[in-house]
Image (spheres, grey):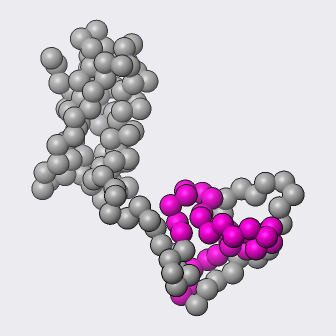
């Protein structure tokens, strides 16, 4: 459940006839509001029948969170974060990420004996597995 601002009341979470928990509806009703958008993500809304639906279904990119994790880590490690480019290639076996960095940053990405590169691959693989996607990260020397 999301945070409630000071001065707002929260009643017990209700469950509709479908079994959906309507905790944020109770917050809205207690405060006189009619906002049916989930305050945690902004993606959950009520459809015409009052059921909770995710309006972002169908708009998700395969391996999107894994790519975001890779992009964040690579930019954090790089001396020139603007030079970091991540290419994505989807196949039947999963998603392959090819990362390009400035020539001076390649050593930072790989690390001694490849330890940093292996750690990056592991973290990205975990992020992908949370979405059910197999991932592979390649470091490309331009």
- The single residue placed furthest to the left in the displayed view is 92
The one of 137 and 40 positioned closer to us in this rendering: 40
Please tell me in which quadrant of the rendered image residue 82 appears.
top left
- The answer to whether residue 106 shows anywhere in this view is yes
Which residue is more in the foreground, 41 or 105?
A: 41
Highlighted magenta segment, given as a residue range? 18-45
What is the x, y in percent for residue 66?
Answer: 34, 44
Q: Residue at x 17, y 43 (%)?
A: 89
Relative to 101, 4 lies left or right? right
Q: Where, quadrant-wise, is the N terminus in this rendering? A: bottom right
**Between 17 and 63, the one nearer to me in the picture:** 17
Q: Position of residue 33 (x, y in %)?
A: 74, 68
Q: Position of residue 61 (x, y in %)?
A: 30, 52
Question: Is residue 133 on the magenta stretch?
Answer: no
At 30% from the left edge and 59% from the top edge, which residue is drawn? 132
x and y percentages locating residue 109 in the rendered image: 31, 21
């Amino acid at each position: 459940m999301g945070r409630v601002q000071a001065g707002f009341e929260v009643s017990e979470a209700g469950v509709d006839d479908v079994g959906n928990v309507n905790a944020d509806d109770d917050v809205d009703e207690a405060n006189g509001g009619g906002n049916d958008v989930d305050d945690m993500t902004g993606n959950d809304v009520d459809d015409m029948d009052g059921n909770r639906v995710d309006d972002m279904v169908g708009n998700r990119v395969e391996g999107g969170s894994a790519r975001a994790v890779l992009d964040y880590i690579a930019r954090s490690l790089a001396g020139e974060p603007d030079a970091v480019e991540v290419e994505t290639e989807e196949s039947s076996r999963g998603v392959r990420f090819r990362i390009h960095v400035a020539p001076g940053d390649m050593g930072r990405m790989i690390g001694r004996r490849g330890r940093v590169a292996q750690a990056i691959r592991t973290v990205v693989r975990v992020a992908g597995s949370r979405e059910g996607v197999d991932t592979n990260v390649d470091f490309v020397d331009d």
